Image (cartoon, rainbow, N blue to C red):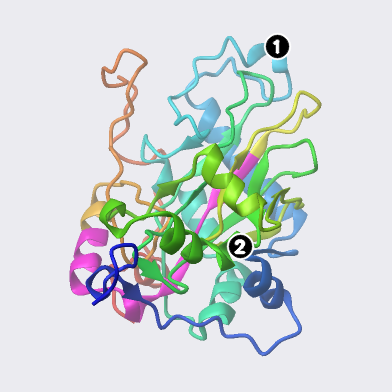
Amino acid sequence: MPSADQPSASTIEESSFKIQNPGGDWRDELEKKGYTVVRGVLTRERAKYYQDQAFRWLKSFDSTLDLDDPATWAKADLPWQTDKNTYEHYSVVHEKFMWEARQEPKLIEAFAQLWGTDELLVSFDSVNITLPNLKEARKPWPHVDQAPRKRGLHCIQGILNLSEAGPDDGTLCVMDGSSALVEQFFDEETSPADWEMRDNRYFDAAEMEWFAARGVRPVRVQASPGDLILWDSRCIHWGGEPTEKSSVIRTVIYAAYAPAALASPAALAEKQRIFASHGSTTHWPHTNIKLRELVARQPDGTPDPRHRTQPLEPAEHTDKLLKLAGIKAY
């Protein structure tokens, strides 16, 4: 019988996930630190193509927006985005350029190397376009995207980097080494009775001190256009805002992959339903499949009249795309 401060067997979801790692490449760092950068997944030219497509999509809402002229940014009638600077409404998740990016061979190859299979599902995740110095920078919101009840490796998240991510630019911030300690934290500092069933858990300042006392420090991940940033969902992280010194428009596409064999029939059914509605989901490709609100809201809470029920430029539903989406079986 477990003590009151220890998780009971019924609350724990153990994972059999193992990174397929022969040693000697970026997977070493991912296992040790909980994050890594895979260099040159795209050529710079290809990264520029996807950034241009993302900019083209953004400018479709206001033709006066000139992304080369910051003077036009504040006046532009931009589409609604979350407070995390991501766009996940207006069917953008299923735009042609988004699906083209998800099918990039070296992107898929990186995740295939992780899981030991190329029979993968991909998340229906968002695009981030952050115009620097346009609004007050959001304070860090340290969190993990894996519920305390889940133990071991369940999900690796990914960012396809399309812009420079230097020390002052917008980028992913991680607590280096936190993935190896987070389960200990939950067991020692929290009660299973307080563990929410959702795969998202935020940390307050006092809790972050627990990690700092064990030598865990924040890192702004630096990457170039075409690089792939990977991190364990147990790694504490947040979106790092650009400083006032940055002039770079952060542009990234979030994409995570997992073996299709891990998805339950119910998860696949929900994935298919969301795909049909051109909706977006969480960072998880194979479980925790939840439809994010379809219709963007204006500041007063009313639906944005510019809501789009389908992409401006739909993707071709190739065999490869449909398998990644969970629509067709491998």
Determine contact: label 2, label 1, CB under 8 Å: no
Residue position marked by numbered label 2 in the rendering = 230
Which image quarter: residue 81?
A: top left
- Kindly identify the residue that appears in the image at 31 percent across and 40 percent down: 310
Q: Tell me if residue 233 can be seen.
A: no
Give above or below for 125 relative to 188.
above
In the rendered image, the vertical position of residue 161 relative to residue 112, given as above or below? above
Residue shown at 71% from the left, 44% from the top? 163
Query: Which residues make up the magenta segment?
Result: 251-272
**Label 1 is placed on what type of residue?**
Ala
Nearer to me, 101 or 112: 112
Foreground disc of the pair 2, 1: 2
Quarter location, residue 322: bottom left
Nearer-the-camera pick, 172 or 257: 172
**Which residue is painted at 24% across and 66% down in the image?**
267
Q: Would residue 266 be counted in the magenta stretch?
A: yes
**Residue 255 on the magenta segment:** yes
Dot 1: what SS?
A: helix
In the rendering, at what x and y percent does residue 134 appear? 64, 18
Label 2 – label 1 distance at C-alpha: 34 Å
Q: Secondary structure at mark 2?
A: strand
For image coordinates 54% across by 40% down, the residue present is: 206
Residue 195 x %, y %: 31, 54
Residue 171: horizontal and vertical position, in percent? Answer: 67, 43
Reading the image, the residue beneath label 1 is 71
Amino acid type at image mark 2: Leu
Q: Residues within 10 Å of mark 1 (few under 14, many from 20)?
A: few
Q: Which quadrant, please, contains the C terminus?
A: bottom left
User: Quick check: 262 above or below 173?
Assistant: below
Residue 280 visible to an observer of this rendering: yes
Q: Is residue 206 above or below residue 304?
A: below
Q: Residue 289: give x, y in percent of width and height.
A: 29, 58
